[in-house]
Amino acid sequence: MRQETNENKMASLNNDCRLLVISHMPLAYAMAWRLKDCGVSLEDLRQEGCLGLCEAATRYNEQLGCRFATYASYWCRKMMLRAIHRTPTTDSLQDETYREVDEDDDILRIGLQRYIDDALQRLTHQERQVVRMYYGIGCESLSLREIAATMGISISRASTLHQQAIQRLKTTLKRRPSTGDLNT
């Protein structure tokens, strides 16, 4: 049934959009491969990814200032996560309780929050403390001067910790989330 929806979606696209979708299918397939152990079949994830590509192609605006692949990644991931969250887990089957998630943005926010929390856990204690205070994570946002005073370190040291933390977060977040990152 999802195959028919995908074919209908492709038929409704103009040639430029169709070319974007076809040329970026490897992106959707790679994303599906990384999520293959989430309880949804690989083929279903691929279909969802293709639907995400179709959605991205119809909404894409070159004037946004980002590459199509970047824009399409959001839509592919959104469609795949939606499919994953529609699939009942073993626990919910035992309880016969099916939780339907209405807001796609909540799904992405929760997944991204877990991903970011995991990245923060990879920082040293001091780096994590500086990042949390600087960006107001769980507290009021503070300047580097205020952070230095709170932690009893120099402003230069606070700045260095901030830079190290940001570099480490960039490195960590460049890696794609694993299945465990999205489902735990």
Image (cartoon, rainbow, N blue to C red):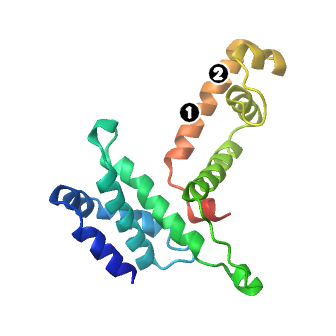
Closer to the camera, 157 or 118? 118
Of the 4 image quadrants, the one containing the N terminus is bottom left
Residue at 71 percent of width and 80 percent of height: 92
Q: Is residue 161 above or below residue 46?
A: above
Closer to the camera, 166 or 75? 75
Location of mark 2 (residue):
160
Label 2 SS: helix
10 Å crowding of disc 1: few (<14), some (14-19), many (20+): few
Where residue 24 sits, quadrant-wise, is bottom left
The numbered dot on residue 48 is: none
Name the amino acid, label 1: Gln
Which tag, 1 or 2, sits closer to the chain's start?
A: 2
Residue at 83 percent of width and 19 percent of height: 150
Marks 1/2 in contact by CB < 8 Å: the verdict is: no
Q: Is residue 164 above or below residue 176?
A: above
x, y percent for residue 46: 39, 72
Q: Is residue 11 left or right of residue 149?
A: left
x, y percent for residue 162: 65, 26
Q: Is residue 80 above or below residue 130?
A: below
Where residue 88 sits, quadrant-wise, is bottom right
x, y percent for residue 13: 23, 63
Name the amino acid, label 2: Thr
Where residue 133 sits, quadrant-wise, is top right
The numbered dot on residue 167 is: 1
x, y percent for residue 82: 53, 66
Q: Is residue 85 above or below residue 115?
A: below
